[in-house]
Image: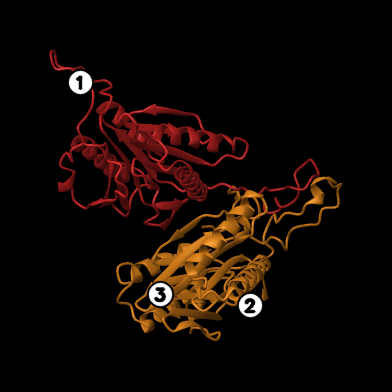
Chain colours: A orange, B red
Amino acid sequence: MDHFPMQWGRPRNDTFDAYGTYPVAQRTYNGGVDAFSAGVQHTQQPIVTGTSVLAIKYKDGVMMAADNLASYGSLARFKDIQRLHPVGTNTVIGAGGDMSDFQYIQALLDELMIGEFTEQDGHSLGPSEIHEYLSHVMYARRSKMDPLWNALIVGGFKDGKRFLSYVDLLGTTYSASTLATGYGSYIAQPLLRKAVEGNEDTLTEDEAVKILEQSMKVLFYRDARSLNKYQIAKISADGVAISESRSVETNWSFAEGIRGYGAQTQ
Amino acid sequence: MPDMIALSHPASGHPQQRQFNPYSENGGTILAISGADFSVIAGDTRQSEGYSIQTRYAPKVFRLTDKAVLAVNGFAADGNMFVKQVRQRLEWYRHAHAKDMPLRAIARLIQTMLYARRFFPYYVYNILGGIEEDGSGAVYSFDPVGSYERESCRAAGAAQSLVQPFLDNQIYFKNQVPQPGHPHPKHLPLTTVIQLVIDSFTSATERHIEVGDGLEMFVVLAKGSPLYGLENIDGVQEMTATNDGERLFVVRRNLKRD
């Protein structure tokens, strides 16, 4: 998956904004307008974006991580945004991509959960139902050529079963024991797979936290749209627990030794 | 180095509208071969986008009824949604007629469902395999807008160009001259077909980066057909759900994961 959410769903074109500065560098258009097409506004690009979400299965359930940054192009615009959102008592969704679309999805899910609650029929929506619902919403919107510009990970634990699935702006879905969106799918996913694949039933909670912390650190070192302030969500038989924001120790002393670009003359 | 001020509008003076592309391509390969009284439908289980593996297990081959199996390949979101809708239509048919829809009728249904979306197509190549009402094994292959034909063997997807020529040679005996007095057989036995399918996928896995991880192979046997040694195949599992007579099996194998 592409690191830049504004490129999602688009043909690759490296000559267009190679540095991913949009929308900061975009100039306003003052020409004429097509009155007919202007009648309908469709999302053409994400504006305020979140970067990677990571998720893994472990012995007692599912664990997810996402940082607290919402970027405006290359500007770190909002630094206290929660991108892990609990839905009901068994599910957490994590979102990359456009944050206003994500807030709209949260509103949709609130409405859905309240509707189900008022039935009082002894049933509640679990992670698989929520993922199914989201995949239909996302696919329907892409089919209207008016996508919700997100990559979502749905993690949950219900009736003794772990659940972990992905859905994005195209309606593409899949599940695996490790998932990552955005830059994380390039940088963190290999680390997660190495640590988790085949060990899903033996990894302890502490080990799972360590794996995610390490991956978030690597992402912070390499992803320019990331922040060293993130949360970890744990979904197990005890229900949902989303941590306070935390950070990892980083060490930049190696940067002193880098030669060849930057301000040094020698 | 690319022009860094290429952000500006093209010569026309109109804004550069980079349109949302509602399609993607998720790799993988599917394959079906029919015999005199059986049909084999297979696909790998890798789902990818570009150079990234999204998951190592995403089924592309689906049981529709005890005598019909559908394999879908192309854009995964369209494929899954299409299978869901076909299954819904088959359920309605079962409630209306108290029997499963015959294979050739499913094939025509798939054509009309695909062509209904002629101007916003499902970006999916379908291969339908199963048993006809006359008890013969059959394979139907479709293009994304519904053109279809009945054949006895078809490969589609990422490694179509690697697998189909192999099948033409081994199933249709293309470019093979029969020994005098020993004509090519009309139908191949099930064990031979299964070996050809497994070989096709291990070979495609070697030479195509989008193929691998797992092989899922469905075998449909006609009413009253013997097992042909199917019970001795590693990792076989029966999936038959009705008493209509046809029997359905699935075989799962590992493929290389690199």
The reply to whether label 1 and label 2 mark residues of one chain is: no
Query: Mark 3 and mark 1: span between their CA atoms?
Result: 56 Å
Return the residue nearer the eye: B224 or A84: B224
Please tell me whether mark 3 or mark 1 is closer to you in this view: 3
What's the mark number on residue A159? Answer: 3
The reply to whether label 3 and label 2 mark residues of one chain is: yes
The chain under label 2 reads A
Return the residue nearer the eye: B63 or B185: B63
Label 1: how many Cα within 10 Å (few below 14, some 14–19, many 20+): some
Please tell me whether mark 1 or mark 2 is closer to you in this view: 1
Instruction: Please say if B252 is above or below A122.
Output: above
Q: Residue A54: percent from the left, percent from the top? A: 48, 70
Q: Residue at x 40, y 35 (%)?
A: B102
Q: Residue at x 18, y 51 (%)?
A: B234
Q: Residue B192: percent from the left, percent from the top? A: 19, 35
The chain under label 3 reads A
Whether tag 3 and tag 1 are in contact, CB under 8 A, the answer is no
For the residue labelled by badge 3, is the local secondary structure a helix, a strand or a loop? loop
**Camera sees residue A169:** no
What's the mark number on residue B184? Answer: 1
Residue type at numbered disc 3? Asp
Looking at the rendered structure, the number of numbered marks drawn on it comes to 3
Q: Residue B198: percent from the left, percent from the top? A: 25, 42
> Which residue lies under the disc numbered 2?
A81
Label 2: how many Cα within 10 Å (few below 14, some 14–19, many 20+): some
For the residue labelled by badge 1, is the local secondary structure a helix, a strand or a loop? loop
